[in-house]
Amino acid sequence: MTTVSIENRDNIALVWVDNPPVNALSHSVRAGLKDAMRVIAEDDTIDAAVIACRGRTFIAGADIREFGSPPKAPHLTEVVQIIEDMEKPIVAAIHGTALGGGLEVALSCHYRVAVSSAKIGLPEVKLGILPGAGGTQRFPRIAGVENALDAIISGRHIKAKQALSWGALDQVVDDGLEATALEFAKSVVEKGVRRTGEMAIDGDKYDQAFFDEFRASIARKTRGYFAPERCIRCVEAAVKLPLKEGLDAERRNFQECFTNPQSRALQHVFFAERQVSRVPGISKETPRRNIKRVGIIGAGTMGGGIAMNFANIGMPVTLLEVKQDALERGLGVVRKNYERTASKGRLTAEQVEERMGLFTGTMDYADLADCDLIIEAVFETMDIKKKVFTALDEVAKPGAILASNTSYLDIDDIAAVTRRPADVLGLHFFSPANVMRLLEIVRADNTADDVLATCVDLAKKIGKVGVVSGVCHGFIGNRMLSQYAREMSLSVIEGSMPHEVDKAMFDFGMAMGPMTVSDMAGLDIGYLNRQGMDRADYETRATDWIDRVVESGRKGLKTGAGIYDYDEGSRTPKPSEDVMAIIVEESEKLGIERTSQTSEEIVERGMLALINEGAKILGEGIAIRASDIDIVYLNGYGFPPYRGGPMHYADQIGVKEVYSKILENAEKFGSRWWQPAPLLKELAEAGSSFADYDKRQVG
């Protein structure tokens, strides 16, 4: 197949790129563009050229099929330089998206025309690298330094009209792109070329203080990431150096990023997110159910947040509560959330009213009879949930999907109270449900394939990353979290203070330390759960000190005091002398000789607990892939993306090394909680990895 072809349109060469589905910069495209430039340069009947793409988009970036393979000449750096060095004007005609290398091709052209629906961007930072074919050097010259920093550091897509205002585009049209680009090319024949790389930047305006201030402004957002600083250094080079030297600096910084473990981790995440919707037994041919109206039971924080996801895509929602005041309060919170979004300019007042108009409040189960999907979001008690599903079974129409938002409870038990267990599954949203990307889709023993397929598709429609889990206590995320939380709490009773544990995990890259998370969630929730449990079923040394904290009246952030102290109106935790005293007393009571632990020891203990439980979950078939577990932890639990997730992190350490350390912990801490997962043992002894396991299992 010819991926690049040339047409002569009245002395203007129309260079077509045709490499479905997204015109990726495969070797054939790069070679084709290089050959096309040679033909154009040698043909005296051609005065200028337009580079355009067939199909739905301009060049959307690199060819992911070539990831991990040795680069093959011609390299993109050579191709874009050839385009920029052309003596005849070259115009890029952009539709769809021009991303990464695609935008670098467009930047090497002398002019750019786009349709108004087009978007451009340099998203390489999301893969732990930076634009490596002149993007960091040409974009600041054409679009301005501030705009280039914004685009390159965020990796976001930039709409055509904004790109036009930056100077990155020369003309934007609503339609007729091909004809407009050809006319534009004719109009610049006399004007000649305008090379982006030769444009000057006012170096006096962008001194060291400017870049220092920019670094400070993004420090919180880019904490722990390797690539953003290298991106900034490249833009600094664009300001200070001529193009050739700037390109050399870009190449050096690109290599630093490319060889850093973070790039492998972030590329793992990129592919893992695309794998997560591939479910064995489910295909394009699997029937789907039509979801036009959704019912939500419970108008509290979680129920209201869940409902917003559907209203956001224009789907009517029936919201049920048992009391009128609770219903009105819930709808009021939803309105406030939308109005807060509008105050930030992300919604208009009209859009707020449109979305609120999609809500119908009720206290009557019969009003759910026309819903295609009904999600229960009531208190986390099995008896209450069974009553709800018994009532739903009486009113829901045939074929309606019935879902529980439970965080821990057995979906099979819930489904068993209905006469339609094939229609039941778990949809575990994470709080705040209108913001958090993760959705655990829990497949019960009897869940029908079309029900599962419908919900996997629906997750994408509402902007969630849907990960399929089997049934077990806590599913994937919370089951693993319990092991991590136990070991972090034991680290406290054995010698570290809460703020030391939190600092170790925060410095590792977690969004928050485990003690801060506990305070935010509310210490009383776990306390109340433990009151109904047999003490033999959990590690009392890890929780007795927390129970004493709760019994002293400290329930967490909501009461202004928990494991930490909080100033009135503040969410900033401060170490508490009262809690420290409780911890020391409990250690003495248990006969524990408190021993200081390094940050590395704390991190290792927490990570090994996560990895071992993840391996058990994987071996039991609760999770489909190790990479699915990573996606759960990245999107629901604040795990640092640049480490790739707990299972990828295990591969980075080496599964054999992880297994050895878990055996050491079994000797050091006892085998009750440190029994190695059978799958971990199997992989370690085979010299294999979780990535290898994924390839063998499902590809």
Image (cartoon, grey):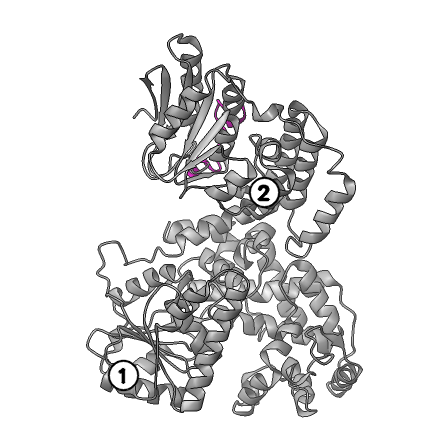
Residue type of the residue flagged with mark 1: Asp
Q: Which mark is residue 152?
A: 2
Residue 544 visible? The answer is yes
The numbered mark, 1 or 2, whose residue comes first in the sequence reads 2
Q: Quadrant of residue 359?
A: bottom left
Q: Nearer the viewer, residue 679 or 625?
A: 625
Q: Which residue is mark 1?
A: 367
Most foreground residue, 228 or 324: 324
Image side of residue 231 versus residue 2, left or right = right
Reply above or below: 447 against 61: below
What is the three-letter code of the residue carrying label 2?
Ile
Task: Calculate the distance from the C-alpha at mark 1 to the C-alpha at mark 2.
Answer: 50 Å
Q: Is residue 70 visible?
A: no
Q: Please provide percent x and percent y for residue 38.
A: 44, 13
Rendering coords of residue 151 (x, y %): 57, 44
- What residue range appears in magenta? 62-77
Is 431 a magenta residue? no
- Give the image quarter of residue 639: bottom right
Residue 6, horizontal then vertical, whole percent = 34, 19
Q: Is residue 609 found left or right of 324 in the rendered image?
A: right
Q: Return the residue found at the far left.
A: 398
Give the vertical position of 396 relative to 8 (above or below): below
Residue at left offset 29%, top offset 86%: 365
Q: Which residue is painted at 74% across and 71% down in the image?
A: 499
Disc 1 is placed on an element classified as helix
Q: Position of residue 307 (x, y in %)?
A: 40, 73
Which image quarter is the N terminus in? top left
Label 2 neighbour load within 10 Å: few <14, some 14-19, many 20+? many
